[in-house]
Amino acid sequence: MQEVDFLVVGCGPAGGTAAREAARAGVETLVLERDPVIGAKRVCAAGLRPGFCEDFDLPRSIVHCDPPTISVRGLSGRRYDFATVGNAHTTTREELDGTIASLARNEGARIETQMLFRNYVADGERTIVEYADLRSGERHKVRARSVLLAQGSSARFAPKTPLEYDAWSAGLITCYQYRVYLERPAIDETYRILEMHYYLTESGRNVIAWMFPKRDHLSIGLGIQGKYSGKDLRAELDAFLPTVQERLFPGIGYTVREEGNLLYGGAPRPRISHGNVMVAGTAAGLVDATTGEGIHEAAFSGRLAAQTVADARRGRTTAPAQSYEKALKDVFYGRLRHRHKLMTFLERKPVRFDVLFDHIARTPRFATMLQRDRNDFSLGEWMYLYAQAALFSIRAIRA
């Protein structure tokens, strides 16, 4: 049986960052990635927060565009433009995940692709992980001092085990995206905005759609809560695409590459540690339900996991997984749980989306605060935030 200090399952932003920073700290690290090409099968608009590359020491070459504006539309069709706190960035998951993985390898992490995680069991002070080699069909086991599970929305845990979350399936979103390759550039405005659309299908189901500009294509896609057939998703996206085309690239020919997958948009997983096992990124439910943003949260959770593992190796903590869970919840869970409750409230009566956008447009300070993590708010900012939330709630209930 293989032996390793730190085993990471999944090489997205969470797993890749954890592997890179743990290996840099001298921790023997092994990564098991299901796909043959890291990041190639990720259906994601791949929008990054301002300063993301600097925060996680990544080359700016992965950035395609730097849109300074987020544009949103609700049922009314009215457009609301909000300036980002510094320019946002767009990239692709192939470049983002692949770059992080390459940097992790440079630090000494070992990354094995086409390896499918099956389960884990406790083994004294260590954990045994079983996985399948998808090339040979053989099963293997590895014993690790610490384990990080970062498989994204595909994360599943055995029933009646500590990490099981009964509401996980209810939070899944079926997504479909076109990479639209234009024969010539779209209008200039296209590359300065990130578009989000919130509307209803003909059958009354809530839709989140988007347009994110990239270096050589536009990412245009949508997500619908729960299971939705590929045929119906394609039809819905085909109906949405012309509304973007007529504004941004009228009369320009294009080809498309289709992508589909399940993403997550529910509440964070209640428990994200068990023994020596930690859960990170989307697998932990670290996704903003109102926007689908989760890359920053994923990378941060990977960094935090690496720090706790390195601290344990140096004898600074005797319970790294439990330390990790507490620290991560302190940073993200308050905001993410509130965003999930907000999204549920809005979806009950979708006209409330327009009420929210109008309220944010009237209060620039409120708009700026919503883009920040709440763990650094002052008492005065908290009071202002709750006051604005109360005013919005009154308007939304009356709508």
Image: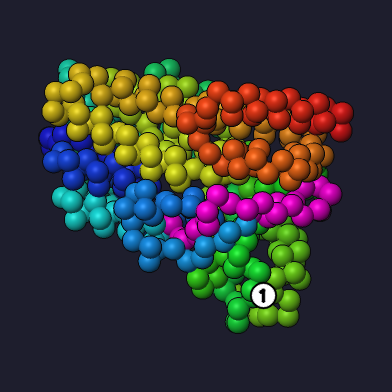
Q: Amino acid at mark 1?
A: Ile
Q: Is residue 149 left or right of residue 260?
A: left
Residue behind mark 1: 187
Q: Quadrant of residue 303?
A: top left
Percent from the top left, x then y, of residue 255?
60, 75
Viewer-side residue, 230 vs 199: 199
Q: Quadrant of residue 257?
A: bottom right
In the structure shown, which secondary structural element does the residue marked by tag 1 occupy?
loop
Percent from the top left, x then y, of residue 70?
64, 54
Query: Is 68 within the magenta?
Result: no
Percent from the top left, x then y, of residue 162?
39, 18
Query: Is 87 within the magenta?
Result: yes
Say above or below: 310 vs 250: above
Q: Quadrant of residue 245?
A: bottom right
What quarter of the picture does the N terminus occupy? top left
What quarter of the picture does the C terminus occupy? top right
Question: Magenta residues?
Answer: 70-93
Q: Seen from this angle, which residue lies furthest front?
A: 380
Percent from the top left, x then y, of residue 201?
77, 48
Viewer-side residue, 193 vs 165: 193
- Residue 219 in sight in this render: no
- Residue 313 in sight in this render: yes
